[in-house]
Image (spheres, rainbow, N blue to C red):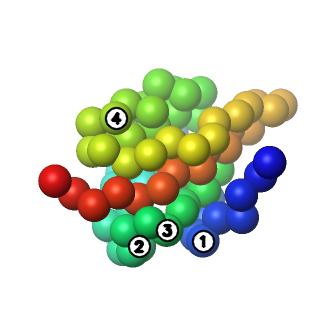
Amino acid sequence: MTLKPDHILDATGLYCPEPVMLLHNRIRDIAVGETLQVLATDPSTERDIPKFCHFLGHELLQQDQFDGNYRYLLRKQASG
């Protein structure tokens, strides 16, 4: 089952640390409970985005990779 994201962040063509920096800025601007889909082509996002979610307490709902493209779906959680 694929959820329709509330917001999309296209970070394709960008390399570490840019995708996570953009994610950090963008997630700040959305409401708690909303979802954000991140599209990326940098393989380091496979490590960086799950760590970002774990460290900041956001929920990583989906993570997949296809033909060098990476897709993540996050749900913003209230900051503690």
Is disc 2 in contact with disc 1, using a CB cutoff of under 8 Å? yes
Is disc 1 in contact with disc 3, using a CB cutoff of under 8 Å? yes
Q: Secondary structure at mark 1?
A: loop
Quick one: label 1 or label 4, which is nearer the N terminus?
A: 1
> For the residues marked 2 and 1, what is the alpha-carbon distance in whole angstroms?
9 Å
Q: Quadrant of residue 61?
A: top right
Q: Badge 2 is on which residue?
A: 30
Where is 68 relative to 8, above or below? Answer: above
Q: Badge 4 is on which residue?
A: 54
Is disc 2 in contact with disc 3, using a CB cutoff of under 8 Å? yes
Q: Amino acid at mark 1?
A: Asp
Quick one: label 3 or label 4, which is nearer the N terminus?
A: 3
Q: Badge 1 is on which residue?
A: 6
Q: Nearer the viewer, residue 67 or 77?
A: 77
Q: Secondary structure at mark 2?
A: loop
Where is 6 relative to 54, above or below? Answer: below
> For the residues marked 2 and 3, what is the alpha-carbon distance in whole angstroms?
7 Å
Is disc 3 in contact with disc 4, using a CB cutoff of under 8 Å? no
> Left or right: 69 with respect to 75?
right
